[in-house]
Image (cartoon, rainbow, N blue to C red):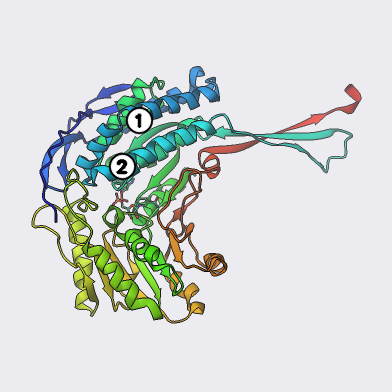
Amino acid sequence: MTQSKHEFPIPSFPAGKLLIDGQWRDAQDNQTIDVVNPATEQVYAQIAAGTKQDVDLAVQAAQTCFESKAWQRMRPLDRGRLLERLALLVEEHADELATLEAWDNGKPFAVARHVDVQFTMDALRYHAGWASKMTGEYITLSPFANDGGIYRAYTERRPVGVVAGITPWNFPLGQAVQKIAPAIAFGCTIVLKPSEETSMTALRLGELICEAGFPDGAVNIVTGYGDPVGSSLVDHPMVRKITFTGSTATGQRILAAASGQMKRVTLELGGKSPTVVLADADMEQAIPGAAMAIFANTGQLCTAGSRLIVEESVFDEVTTGVAEFANNLSIGHAFTPDVMLGPLISQRQLDKVSGMVSAGVDAGAQVLCGGGRAANSGYFYQPTVVTNVAPEAQLNREEIFGPVVIASKLKALDQLKAAANDTEYGLGASIWTSNINKAHLLADQIDAGTVWINTHNILDTAMPFGGMKMSGLGREFGSEAINAFTEPKAVCMRLDPNKI
Ligand code: NAD
């Protein structure tokens, strides 16, 4: 564990405020939530604890903006320009935003700068281009009404209206933009509720949104707890679509609540993704690749490769290699040079990860490396490799969301389909092999929203992203984003050939 002080001062952000209708306001009852630095366990800031009344004001502002002539008549290219201007401002403030993210989430500054902030700029620019590319179809019909008319139809894509974006704490800035950018590109307005554990970069982004000249009410940010802020957004009759990233349990609650008003819902949920290493893999790539599939972002990744499935003949080589790699990862404070892993987000998360590993060990699991806290203060946990875990054990079935990988042997390739899919989740998977033929045929067999070959955790806004089974509903990114934020509308007409 590398020790260092937080020498980097906290950049300013609109502490304790909500962005509603272009104005920064206090929460209705002036309550706040303490913000804890996960590396030091110190409270160092406060955010506003929004209320149902704040949600009502924010949704009303978003609806008023959505219905305004200015928004309805804004040229698609000009919605794209808003996003481009925001991308430029994010670029100008990249180090500052990364510093804020490192303070808030604990992740290494270099990761915040080169992953989170880079993704944020890329997502803004990618979606800026989509704003002017919402096309429909022109269709000649074959109607059963044999009345001499000529029937034609065209379709157009209509923005769904006010969107609620609800996000978790592992990539706070990137996830905020993952919701805001497509909503704006496709002509919706949005109320964002960031995680109560990591709201600071979303709030600073809100200031940049105002500076970029977004119309008042187009983007509103209400910080606070899942209940009441998230639940009030889900229940609000003017919210037409919910785009949620978070746990499967919360996603299920949101889906049930949204059904009463038939709201559109996109759910990006949890995972228990397999990393499959075959005997013919290039081990110089596969071993570090399998290690970072799980340990990146301290395992707090929805697509983390948390089940390592290895062909029997290379099982010892791969697991020993991953454990050695883990032992050499430098864990520490965000601003320590060369640090690779930060802490878990909270005491609750540390307790959850430690508890699951301890219970597994009590049941006979063998720990190859790690298996405990990495420091006496801060929510640091050692990168951990565990073997000898029964398929039905909790460690193999539940999402841990920490730096813990469960390794198991694959005795024969024809067992791969069953082993990889032996989970209620279906978010990601990777296959490591030198045989490209095998790679593609095996990729077909895995039920996951994304299957990587000789890589893992590559996300790109040009590639559709989402989960199968309990990992979610719908897709975001790529051309799929159009479906997530718009409704197709058909306009059907009868032309009279006698009236030419
Ligand atoms: P969480 O479900 O506890 O919280 C996510 C968000 O939902 C937070 O903003 C929270 O305040 C809000 N919320 C809580 N209760 C709510 C309710 N009743 N109604 C509306 N909103 C509510 O998840 P978390 O602990 O913040 O994040 C970790 C989880 O997120 C993991 O399961 C992880 O796999 C998942 N995740 C998924 C993806 C993906 O794209 N599939 C990406 C990142 C994280």
On the rendered structure, is 99 left or right of 262? left
At mark 2, the secondary structure is helix
**Label 2 sits on residue:** 172
Considering only vertical position in the picture, is 303 above or below 157? below
Q: Is residue 238 above or below residue 478?
A: above
Relative placement, left or right, of 495 versus 15 is right
Q: Return the residue at label 1.
A: 91
Where is residue 171 drawn, in percent x and y?
Answer: 32, 45
Q: Is mark 2 within 8 Å of ligand 1?
A: no
Q: Quadrant of residue 13?
A: top left
96 is higher (above) or lower (below) than 459: above
The residue sitting at the right extreme is 498
Q: Position of residue 277 (x, y in %)?
A: 42, 70
* Any part of residue 360 in sight: no
- Quadrant in the picture for residue 157: top right
Q: Residue at x 48, y 36 (%)?
A: 126
Which residue sits at x=37%, y=39%? 118
Q: Residue at x 19, y 51 (%)?
A: 346
Looking at the rendered structure, the secondary structure element under dot 1 is helix
Residue 142 horizontal side relative to residue 40, left or right: right
Q: Which label's residue is closer to the chain start, 1 or 2?
A: 1
State the residue lying farthest toward the left.
Answer: 376
Q: Relative to 242, is 416 above or below?
A: below
* Point 48% across, 35% down: residue: 127
Disc 1 to disc 2, C-alpha distance:
17 Å
Confirm or deny contact between disc 1 and disc 2 (CB under 8 A).
no
Amino acid, disc 2? Pro
Q: Residues within 10 Å of mark 2 (few under 14, many from 20)?
A: many
| Amino acid on which the number 1 mark rests in the picture | Glu
For disc 1, the neighbor class at 10 Å (few under 14, some 14 to 19, many from 20) is some
Q: Is residue 382 visible?
A: yes
Label ID, residue 294: none
